[in-house]
Image (spheres, grey):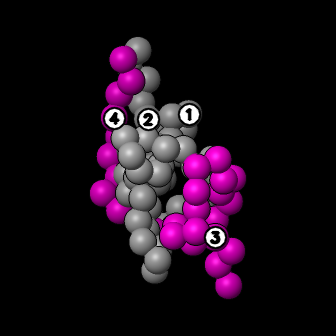
Amino acid sequence: MKAQYIKDLTPDDAVDSAFALCRAERCKKQNGDAFLRGQLQDRTGSMAAVAWTLSEDQIEAALASRYVHIRGVVTRYKGGKQ
């Protein structure tokens, strides 16, 4: 059984769970480094996701996959959670 669902996550919650990855894209920081932006989804809803410190291999693996395991912290951004 899945331990964490998007509808239950609130800012400052630690996340360690699997989600479907929707609409993921590689982006560039101002310094030229790559980061990943996407949308996470489960049966309870969806939320924005940003991974700032992935390696190129990790970004490629995430873009090639439909599901990802997320470890991080929920934050509030522009009135929503990510």
Q: Quadrant of residue 53?
A: top right
The kind of secondary structure element at disc 3 is loop
Q: Which amino acid does label 3 sit on?
A: Gln
For disc 1, the neighbor class at 10 Å (few under 14, some 14 to 19, many from 20) is few
Whether residue 28 sits left or right of residue 44 in the image: it is: left
The one nearer the camera, 24 or 46, is: 46
Q: How far apart are marks 4 and 2 (CA)?
A: 5 Å
Nearer-N-terminus badge (4/3): 3
Nearer-N-terminus badge (3/1): 3
Which quadrant of the figure contains the N terminus?
A: bottom right
For disc 2, the neighbor class at 10 Å (few under 14, some 14 to 19, many from 20) is some
- Checking the image for residue 4, the label placed there is 3
Q: Which amino acid does label 2 sit on?
A: Phe
Q: Which residue is drawn at 41% across and 65% down?
A: 46
Bounds of the magenta segment: 1-30
Residue under numbered circle 4:
27
Q: What residue type is labelled 1?
A: Thr
The kind of secondary structure element at disc 2 is strand
